[in-house]
Image (cartoon, rainbow, N blue to C red):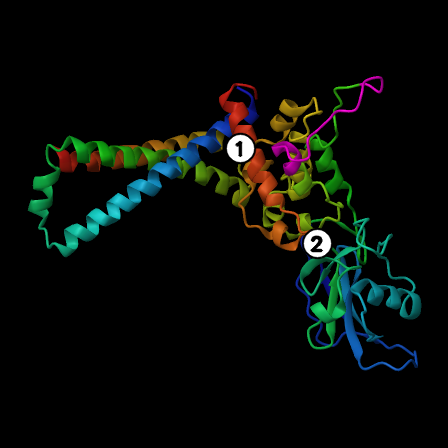
Amino acid sequence: MLCSRRSGRSRAKALPPEPAVIASTETQATTTTLQVDIWRGGATGCLRRYQVPRRDNQTVLDVVTYVQRHLDPTLAYRFACRVGMCGSCAMTVNGVARWTCRTHVSKVMRGARLEIAPLRNLPVIRDLACDMREFFEKWTQARGRFAPTRTRREDFALIPPESRERRAVDAAIECIGCGVCYASCDVVAWNPDYLGPAALNRAWTLANDVRDAGRIERLRAVAGDAGCHACHTHLSCTERCPKKLSPTAGIAGLKRAVALAALKGEL
Amino acid sequence: MTPARRETLLWIMQRASAAVLALCVLVHLVTVVYAVRGGLSAAEILGRTRGSAAWLAFYSLFVLAVSVHAPIGLRAVALEWLGWRGASRDWVMVAIGSALALAGLRAVFAVFL
C-alpha cells in the first residue's frame, strides 16, 4: 500500500511499490487475473491493490463493482444506469478520465494492470466518489437554465431542423454531465474559477436556442477570464468526451457570439 | 464599462493584433532572409530604410501590434500562473505595453531618420 496526499484539487502521483493485495477467492475459470490499484481515502489516501478475475467484455465499472461486492464492501463509488446515459460513473482510469460503464478493460489495461482513481479537478468525498457540486454550480453561473419566452397557452415553437441554430444545438446537446471534460481540462486546474467545458457547452446550446430569452445575460456570464476567453483550445475536452461532443467548438462559438455582442454594445 | 465587455474587447484586441503580427512577422522574416542572402551591408540597409515612409509605416505598425498583443497575453499568464488579478496587474501591463512601444518606436525612428 502506498499512501499519499491528494493536495487540493489534483491527485498526488502515486505508483505503488508494493500495494496491499486483497485476493479474490472466486474459483470461476478465468484466462488471467487483473491487478487493480484503486484509490482509497479522500484528499489523503492510498492506492490499494486488488486481484480481480479477468472476463470477456468486462468493463472498468464491472471491475470496480466486483471489488465492492466480493473483496471490499467499504469501497465508495458512484454509478446508476450502466449504459452510458446518466454520466455518474466517470473515474480516472490509468491516468485518463473516462466513463467506466462503457470502457472495456481490454481497451485500457496496461499488461494486466489497471489504476483507478477519482476524477481530477474535483474534491474527493471518499475513494472514487467526487463532490460534483462545484461542477454543477458552474452550470448555474453560466446561466445554463432555459429562459422561456412563451407560455403554455401558446403553440409550440417551430424550429426548422436544418436551421443553423438548430444544427449547432444538435452538435452539443447530448452532454450527460459526466465531468470527464472538466477533469481533463488544464485550464480548470490552473484557474479554479474557470467555468469549464461542460458549463460553457451548455451555455452554447442555449445561446443557439431561438426560444430562449436570456441570451445577452448568458453571454455576459460566460465572457471574461473565468469564461470562454480563458479557454486555450487544448482540445482535451473534445479528445476525452465520451459522447464525442466538441465543447471546444462550442466555446469558440461563444467567443464569436460574445465578441459580436460586445462590438454592438450589448454586453 | 462592464467587466464582460472589457474582457471581450481585450480579447478582440489581442486577436486582431495577432492577425496583424502574422503578416508582419512573415514580411519581416522574408526581409531579413533577403538582406542576409543578398549580402547587404548595414550601410546599404540604412540606405533603404532612411527616409522611407513605407518601412516607417510597416515597422511602426509591427511595434504597435506587439505592444498591444504581448501585455494582454501576459495578463492572462499572470492570472493563471500567479493568481494575480485586479488593477495592479492591469497597470503593470499598461507599463509593459508602453515600454515595448517606446523601445520599438525608438528603434524604428533610429533607422528612419
Number of other residues with Cα within 10 Å of mark 1, as a class: few under 14, some 14 to 19, many 20 or more: some
- Residue under the image location 70 percent in, 32 percent down: A141
Number of other residues with Cα within 10 Å of mark 2, as a class: few under 14, some 14 to 19, many 20 or more: many
Is residue A225 something that shows in the picture? no
Quarter that holds the N terminus of chain A:
bottom right
Of the two numbered discs 1 and 2 on the same chain, state the one appearing first in sequence.
Answer: 2
Whether residue B28 sits left or right of residue A265 in the image: it is left
- Of residues A255 and A160, which is closer to you in this image? A160
- In magenta, the rendered stretch is A151-168
Secondary structure beneath dot 2 equals: loop
Chain hosting mark 1: A
- Of residues A216 and B91, which is closer to you in this image? A216
Q: Residue A65 carries which label?
A: none
The amino acid pointed to by label 1 is Arg
Secondary structure beneath dot 1 equals: helix
Chain hosting mark 2: A
Position of residue A249 relative to residue A119, above or below, is above
Residue at label 1?
Answer: A256
- Residue under the image location 55 percent in, 29 percent down: A258
Residue at label 2?
Answer: A242
**Number of marks drawn:** 2
Q: Is the magenta stretch mostly helix, strand or loop?
A: loop
